[in-house]
Structures are given as C-alpha cells and as structure tokens.
Image (tube, rainbow, N blue to C red):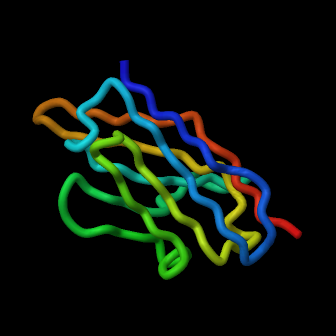
Amino acid sequence: QVQLVESGGGLVQPGGSLRLSCAASGMSFSMYHMNWYRQAPGKQRELVAQIPSSGMLNYADSVKGRFTISRDNAKNTLYLQMNSLKPEDTAVYYCNAKHVVWPSRYDYWGQGTQVTVSS
C-alpha cells in the first residue's frame, strides 16, 4: 500500500524558513514524478513545485527564488525548503506522486501539513 506522509509544517514568522518532508513507502519512489501542492482557505489547490524522476525542476512563479524542491531516492523522501516565507504562503501543503505506465496512471496524495506564516 502506497503511503505519503508529510511533516515539517508549523507556525513561522514572515521572513522565516521551514523544511517540509514527505516520506514515501510502498512504491518505487525513484520512478515517480514528485510534486508539492498547496491549498489555502477558500482557494483551489495549486502546484508549488515539481521534481520529475529525471529532468528539470519546475516552480510556481510565486515561489521561484524562495522555495527549493529536492528528493533523496535512497531515503524515499521528498523535500521542500521554504525560505523568505510570506503570509500568502499560508496553506496546507500536500505531497503528490505521479507515474504513468501506459495504460495505467498512478496518482497518490499525502494527508497534508499545515504551514502558517504570521507574526
């Protein structure tokens, strides 16, 4: 059974930093495209950052230069380093794993971790 478990969220002051982790199990982690999404109250879930199994990283314009996505395939873990946090970064952050082996598509989500940026 595939599990994605996020951790590292919390309350931080504007300008501060947090590092989110997503521990994966029950899957061939290195084969999956991994993503961080977030959802703020009253807003749609949005893509924050992507790290494919191989290839270029991708970031939402709103987090470029502040957030860094990375993965450790040996530890089956995805990370999101968040620096210079702003109140508008407040949201529940979700880890997502995607893989396509035609004709099957695999799409898994974690339970989310709350990030609150406030003074």
Residue 88 x/y as whole percent: 71, 69
- Residue at the farthest top position: 1
- Residue 82, image quadrant: bottom right
Quadrant in the picture for the C terminus: bottom right
Please provide percent x and percent y for residue 96: 42, 44
Q: Residue furthest bottom?
A: 65
Identify the residue shown where x is 60% and y is 43%.
7
Question: Compared with residue 47, is residue 104 higher up or lower down, i.e. above or below?
Answer: above
Residue at image point 62% right, 52% down? 39
Q: Is residue 84 left or right of residue 64?
A: right
Q: Residue 99 sits in which quadrant?
A: top left
- Is residue 94 shown above or below 66? above
Q: Residue at x 68, y 72 (%)?
A: 85
- Residue 63 location, x and y as percent? 53, 74
Q: Position of residue 104 (x, y in %)?
A: 18, 30
- Residue 24 versus residue 88: which sits nearer the camera? 24
**49 vs 75, nearest the viewer:** 75
Q: Is residue 22 left or right of residue 8?
A: left
Nearest to the observer: residue 12 or residue 45:
12
The correct choice, above or below, for 92 with respect to 109 in the image is below
Residue sitting at x 37%, y 60%: 50
Left or right: 71 in relation to 14: left
